Image (spheres, rainbow, N blue to C red):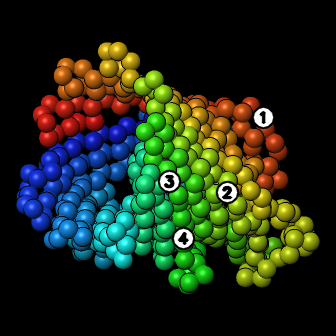
Amino acid sequence: MVKRLLTLLILLSLPAGQLYSSDVLRLNGDIRSNLYIGLIYGDVYNYFNSNVISLRGEAKPDENVSGRFEIRFRNENISELKTLEELKMRESTEPVSIQFYEAYIQFSSLFFKNLDLKVGRQRIAWGTADGFNPTDNFSPMDLEDPLDFKSRLSVNALNANFYFSNFSISMVIQPVFQPSLLPNLDLMENQSNTMMAEYQDKLEQPVISLPEFKAKNFIYGTRIKYSGEIADFSLSYYHGFMTIPSLRDIKIESSGFALKNITPVLIYPKQDVIGIDTAMNVFDIGIFGELSLVFPKGISTVYYINDNRIENKDRKMYGLPEGGISIEDKPFLRFAGGLDYTFKGGYYLNMQYIRGFFNELSASQLNNYIFVYLKKDFFDSRLEIQPSIGFEFDTDNDAIFNMEKTDNEKAYIFSLETNYIPFGTGKIT
């Protein structure tokens, strides 16, 4: 099926210090208007418009204490009204929200000369690859634009960093889990589970079960990083949850033998991740790579009929598929690596190989991808053209859910991004 996603972004940026600047406080920001249209053979399947005002500030009242914030005021003018009463409320007809993207305080030289502590909402960025980062697990993904894999959300955390010589040690504690923001698409349309695929017309909206706010569910991790003149290396460990949900329960309501509806219950699987990443520059060629060894907690699908759990041995008499595993209880490797180089004439090339996409959560789901994009500026950098193409190949396929193994499935994606910058503070994409 051919799908086309058209995106228009108009950006007005306010350079650092333009709003306000002093020795203690600096303010800047931007205004964005985003328009997304998705088409299938000319028919619209996805459309929304958002307008965002971002205000960023940095405060440094003294040498050892500083703070940073970014507040986003957002209006999405495509509302989903369902009742007459909602027509009487402005927040329903003109939805407006406020997002604290970042808001943290940093203490420098706390207890020790080289110890820094950040407390509050912050973006914790680990890894060296470009956009696809298997070691970057704290900050969930922001997939409002389904083609922007680089956008991430911030989390509430305590982040301590100790520096000595060319090394640094980071220790992070995140008490409250935050999920990824998923794209505004029908994510239940294509299902691996045989029953859910067969009874699409009976499917209710999935129920999401978030991790409880308990000490045993605290998310934490640590990283040791070496920064050298030629190359950087780091070794990391993460204990927490995947930020993409996975199927755990299927709850069926029936009247006699007549099936009325099916409600999927999704949870966020637990995982432990050991990661290694590196970045280096060899003859002006940038080389980067990340490898993560993921230890997931296995999840087997549980069926309920009218709130009564059906054991695996009894499923056949109810016409339910036997088995069913959402997450396999065995470790798997994710990898992202590539290179970038700028040729004479200003042609920038970026190539990456990826093993395991961000939404492939189990060993049997891993696929292979290659992404390549080229970027070139024209007319004194007023016009920027960036074509890119991606391939999926040799899928191992979803041996889970008792689906037949398939070989050599292929898919591709092509995109063309054009940036026009008529003035220094305005851009149309």
Quarter of the image where one finds residue 320:
bottom right
Mark 3 neighbour density, 10 Å: few (under 14) some (14–19) many (20 or more): some
Closer to the eye: label 4 or 3 = 3
**Residue 266: where, in percent of width, then height?**
62, 68
Q: Quadrant of residue 408?
A: top right
Who's the residue at 14% across and 41% down the image?
425
Q: The residue tagged with tag 2: helix, strand or loop? A: strand
Let me know if residue 304 appears in the view. Answer: yes
Relative depth, front residue between 294 and 115? 115
According to the picture, the residue beneath numbered tag 1 turns out to be 407
Q: Which residue is mark 4?
A: 220
Mark 2 / mark 1, whichever is N-terminal: 2
Q: Amino acid at mark 3?
A: Lys
Q: CA distance from mark 2 to mark 4?
A: 15 Å
- Against 356, residue 125 (above or below) is below
Mark 3 highlights which residue? 225
**Residue 362 on image: x %, y %:** 70, 54
> Label 1: how many residues lie within 10 Å, few (<14), some (14-19) or many (20+)?
few
- Circle 2 crowding by C-alpha within 10 Å: few under 14, some 14–19, many from 20: many
Q: Which residue is mark 2?
A: 294
Q: Specify few, some or many for label 4: CA neighbours under 10 Å numbering under 14, 14-19, or 20 or more.
A: some
Q: Residue 411 appears at what percent x and percent y?
A: 61, 32
Q: Earlier in the sequence, mark 1 or mark 4?
A: 4
Q: Quadrant of the N terminus?
A: top right
Label 3: which secondary element: strand
- Of the image marks 1 and 3, the number of the one nearer the N terminus: 3
> Left or right: where does residue 259 sit relative to residue 263?
right
Res. 77 visible in picture: no
Q: Which three-letter amino acid code belongs to the residue tagged 1?
A: Asp
Q: Residue at x 37, y 37 (%)?
A: 6
User: Horizontal placement of 214 versus 44: left or right?
Assistant: right
